[in-house]
Amino acid sequence: MNEEQLATTAKALAHPARVRIVRLLAAQNECRGHDVFAGLPLAQSTISQHLRVLKDAGVILSHAIGTSMVYCLNKPVLEEFVNALGEIASDAATCDPGQGESR
Amino acid sequence: MNEEQLATTAKALAHPARVRIVRLLAAQNECRGHDVFAGLPLAQSTISQHLRVLKDAGVILSHAIGTSMVYCLNKPVLEEFVNALGEIASDAATCDPGQGESR
DNA sequence: CCTGTGTATCGTTTATCTACGATTGACGAT
DNA sequence: ATCGTCAATCGTAGATAAACGATACACAGG
């Protein structure tokens, strides 16, 4: 996974509301739009925007069912991201002692 | 890890240049400032800003050595992030068939 | 046909991010 | 003292992002 892709996925997760959405979807697996709208203290239009960001990044999927929408996590995408970062983290040696100085 | 923390770390990783920096540090483990500056096609001041973002988020650590700086990954922070996301991903069931529709 | 429901999109405001050059300050070497 | 190096910070311009209300649209039910 290249830098662009990693950054794109990270960016999608770079807002508390979107993390919350992702958690909601993980917990419920297949979630009605209405439930998402009800699950956050934000305007419907704002949440819709967040959903779009997540979708554009490929983090979630959606399909219409009747008159409403169903959202769910795109598990493979999330997993790839986690794995790529996990590799980076495990490549790194633990950092030395005297660190915290801010100059 | 709460939504805020997850989002904060994700935000730090939400730019290709910063992902690149993180990879550099993972590869070299303890990296001179000069090497970071040389490793990216950006102005020194810009890179310094990116380093600060990463540092503020706790993703990297730094300390002065002589007249220059040394940067390294804050492995535990990265690992926590990866683990938290990994849990979310594994909580989720794989998403159903007919998905891709954009309405 | 009118109405309500569920979502997406538009338009706007305010805030944050990105990038750069220029400057600053600390330090070493000459 | 003067100069060069290293890195952070300042100031600024332009690009994106976040939030909202208002509006639009599709569809279901009466």
Image (tube, coloured by chain):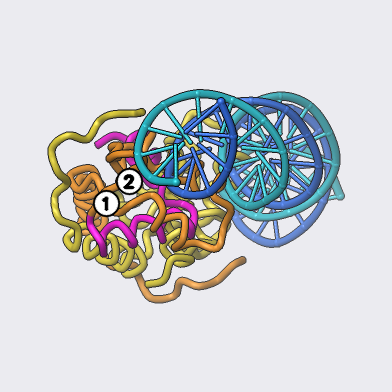
Chain colours: A yellow, B orange, C cyan, D blue
Question: Disc 2 and disc 1: Cα gap in Å?
Answer: 9 Å
Marks 2 and 1 belong to one chain: no
Residue named by callout 1: B85
Residue A79 showing in the rendered view: yes
Side of C7 where A92 appears, left or right: left
Q: Is residue B4 magenta?
A: yes
Residue named by callout 2: A23
Q: Residue at x 14, y 43 (%)?
A: A96
Q: Nearer the viewer, residue A36 or B37?
A: B37
Residue B40 placed where, x, y %?
Answer: 49, 61
Q: Residue at x 14, y 49 (%)?
A: A94
Q: To which chain does the residue with label 2 belong?
A: A
Q: Is residue A102 magenta?
A: no
Q: Main secondary structure of the magenta part?
A: helix
Q: Residue at x 48, y 57 (%)?
A: B17
Q: Nearer the viewer, residue C1 or B86?
A: B86
Specify the segment rendered in magenta.
Answer: B1-29
The secondary structure type at the circle numbered 1 is helix
Quadrant showing the C terminus of chain A:
top left
Residue A99 placed where, x, y %?
Answer: 22, 35
